Amino acid sequence: MAAAIVPLSAALAPTAADAAIHHNGDAATTVCSTIPVSAPSGAKVESVRAAAHAGGTVTFPDAPPLPTPAPITDVPAWCDITVTLTHPGANDHVNVKISLPQDPHRWTGRFQATGGSAYLAGDFGAPLVTAVKAGYVAAATDAGVGQSPVDVSGWALTADGKVDTPLLKNFASRSLHDMAVVGKDVALKFYGSPVRYAYWNGCSTGGRQGFAEAQDHPNDFQGILADAPATNWDRFAVATLWPQVVFNEEKTYPTQCELEAFNTAAVKACDTLDGVKDGIIDDPRSCHWDAHRLIGAKVLCDGKEITISAADADVVDKIWAGPVSPGGEKLWYGPNKGASFSYLAQVGVPFFVADSWVKYFVEKDPQFDTTTLTYGRFAQIFRQSQRDFNDVIGTDDPDLSAFRKAGGKLLSWHGQADALVPTQGSVDYRERVDRLMGGDKKVDDFYRLFLFPGVTHCGGGPGAQPTDALGALVKWVEKGQAPATLAAATTGADGRPVTRDVCRYPQVARYTGHGDPATASSYRCAID
């Protein structure tokens, strides 16, 4: 890649009339240079930089703990324009990167804002390049909090130990609307024509961000793809510490090998409830297998035979049931049966998103030990997080009437084997929207949820994976073709291709009793 970075103060920016498009014979090309950018309301533009990229095969550096993206081939030449914003009084510096195909003929007229992961507000690498290859103008923001998905120590607290409210507000929602405004403005001035269709595309934190936009800025995007969303953040980000609380209170510390023995047994017991033996629990809510059935079983762990105890079973049932108050009030959801325990339930290793949330934002004490919480203290922290942060980052307002009125379409999918963000949180939100806005049929007109059996967080796992959810959303927005199912595919244990059409909630796929069980046409959508 060849990059030329030009500070705004050191360059003469082309006017809007120039639109950064120069014609050379019959071929239109763009010059990658700075352009004047209109500041969103409440913000000020600090700088604009431009960097040209030749395209071809693009590779990405390692950025643990996130997986390294695979190289992307046949990428057209593109231009990155990075706009730095500040909000008066906030002492922040928010970078918004917009990536644009340099050949205007490669632009489809679509804009795609991309989401983040954990404490990363937006990824400036592969998501932007992927979108550019598909003909989008793409954008991401760092919300002014940097580019680490795991480390909040540099921004969460002020020097006097208080939550940095402006930066938390940026991370929660403000930077998203700013990105939409700036991204569309840059596209208009770069090509000389406006964005025709604007889309949001994100998973996990990116999924939560998509719901935030639907709730707070319903006119920003015509289509929102919000997958495995970490909504209900004020609850989810405490609730996922629950396994550590159970270990501590019950004084029982099962190994991962023992814990996964319970999942293996649950899958075996509930696998065929959908009529097919495929090693997957299709609908975990229908799986009523009790962990106590495994008491006395022998499990081989690291060459040592271990007998499952009643205490082990108690711990597992409590984790699956999800957090409760000392008085027995249900606080939130646990992981589904079939979801790995390796993320949320490693003894002494709390889930880092929840650990940081409680340490820095709720307790405001980086030295706070979340592995020693009692049931009573956990419930207090849970309620405190709700009180202090629901309005800031809860992202759980079921009133989507403004988004519906604007004509927006919201498509969300969540893996039934998600081991990080409990799937039932997405179901809970959808059912709250249903109750407020007229039930399944009316809500399906603008918001559809799909639950993918055997799929883990944002993809992976033994289940059939979504093949083109964004494409389904585009058809819904631009052609009015609402998706009754989402196509999914994987490779089975025997090496054969497996296809599924995943049904929209609350329907589930059921085997018809005839035809190849590995083929989507052998299933029908039904209400359990």
Image: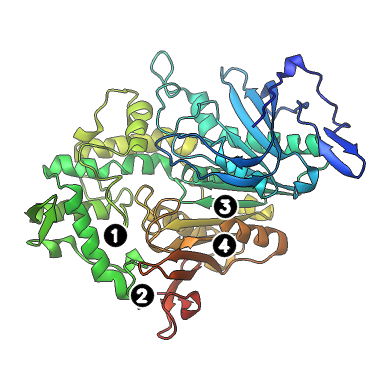
- Residue for badge 2: 274
Q: Residues within 10 Å of mark 2 (few under 14, many from 20)?
A: many
Residues at discs 1 and 4 in contact (Cβ within 8 Å) = no
Nearer the observer: mark 4 or 3; the answer is 3
How far apart marks 2 and 1 lie (CA) works out to 15 Å
Comes first in the chain, label 2 or label 4:
2
Asked whether residue 114 appears in the rendered view, the answer is no
- Residue for badge 4: 443
Pick the quarter of the image with the C terminus: bottom left
Residues at discs 3 and 1 in contact (Cβ within 8 Å) = no
Residue 359 pos. (x, y %): 32, 28
Number of numbered discs on residues: 4
Pick the quarter of the image with the N terminus: top right
Identify the residue at the far bottom of this view. 514
Question: In terms of secondary structure, where does tag 3 sit?
Answer: strand
Amino acid type of disc 4? Val
- Residue for badge 1: 337
In-image side of 33 versus 379 (left or right): right
How far apart marks 3 and 2 lie (CA) works out to 28 Å
In-image side of 179 versus 105 (left or right): left
Amino acid type of disc 2? Asp
**Image quadrant of residue 268?**
bottom left
Comes first in the chain, label 4 or label 3:
3
The residue under the point 40% across, 85% down is 513
- Residue for badge 3: 225
Question: In terms of secondary structure, where does tag 2 sit?
Answer: helix
Comes first in the chain, label 2 or label 1:
2
How far apart marks 3 and 1 lie (CA) works out to 26 Å
